[in-house]
Amino acid sequence: MSKRIFSPLKKKGPWNAESFSIKLLEKEIELEKTFRVDIIQDLITMYSHAIEHYNEQNDPKYYDYQDRLHNLLLKPEVSTVLNSSKKTNLYNFSKHRSITNSQLAKSQIIESFRSPIKCKILESAEKAMKKEEILQNVSRQEHSLEDRVNIRRSRKNLSFCDESMKNSYYIDDKDQVVEVMESYYSKKAKEIEETTLKYLLQMESATPKHKARFVEDMKKDIIKISHKYDQLRVQGLQKFKDSYRKPN
């Protein structure tokens, strides 16, 4: 059986953003034509390379590639390929370090909050420094560009609620509305991130059969989390509106 020629992370030379973007685009186009295991694995590896690079540079582009990797793993076609391929090496994270040391360290930090004993994982000075870096990244993740866009869109659409709501309520302080909504978006983003990292860490040592199950379970959990916080956001906004009910 011939070895694959293309291996984006086999050799780490100087980062060439333009060349990388072109190769990544070519792979993404290939994926749209056919969902093959080798193409999927190349994309996972390239996204992971970008995540690691931009995270080291403290560049916000890190979050863009993190989202793209996340979305790739949630594609139904990817799940189908994984389920139908018994010997797939799709999630060989040990070989290619596709989640990167930073991502795995982040998962360890999250777990350490639940149990002080697990803090022993961060014995070295290098890991201690990564702890501070991860916490900063989590904080920035909570206020990511996507969340802010959603908040601004919701704020803009606030005045276009149904007629019954517009006739009964009014909001005289939009900044407070944004603050209420941002709180729910931030909590949702944080819980989704923790859930994703939990499953990715489990996939590292799982068998191909169990990895396929993990992907499906992760997808279901993320949908449940999104639904939960969307409901809480609507309820929170309704309570805020009730407190500003227009006097008769």
Image (cartoon, rainbow, N blue to C red):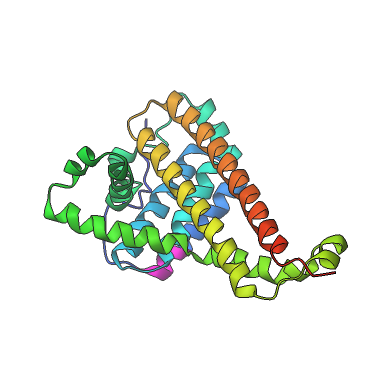
Quadrant where the image shows the C terminus: bottom right
Q: Position of residue 242 (x, y in %)?
A: 72, 60
The residue sitting at the left extreme is 124
Most common secondary structure along the magenta stretch: helix
Residue at 37% from the left image edge and 69% from the top image edge: 59
Residue at 78% from the left image edge and 66% from the top image edge: 169
Q: Is residue 20 magenta?
A: yes
Q: Position of residue 4 (x, y in %)?
A: 37, 41
Q: Position of residue 131 (x, y in %)?
A: 25, 55
Which of 54/242 is in front? 242
Residue 23: tell me if it is visible. no
Q: Is residue 163 above or below residue 175?
A: above
Q: Position of residue 211 (x, y in %)?
A: 44, 30
Quarter assignment of residue 165: bottom right
Q: Is residue 104 left or right of residue 118?
A: right
Q: Is residue 232 above or below residue 56?
A: above
Q: Is residue 161 left or right of residue 212?
A: right
Which of 106/59 is in front? 106
Q: Is residue 116 magenta?
A: no
Residue at 45% from the left image edge and 42% from the top image edge: 195
Which of 208/11 is in front? 208
Q: Is residue 210 left or right of residue 55?
A: right
The residue sitting at the front extreme is 248
Range shown magenta? 16-21
Quadrant where the image shows the N terminus: top left
Residue at 18% from the left image edge and 55% from the top image edge: 128
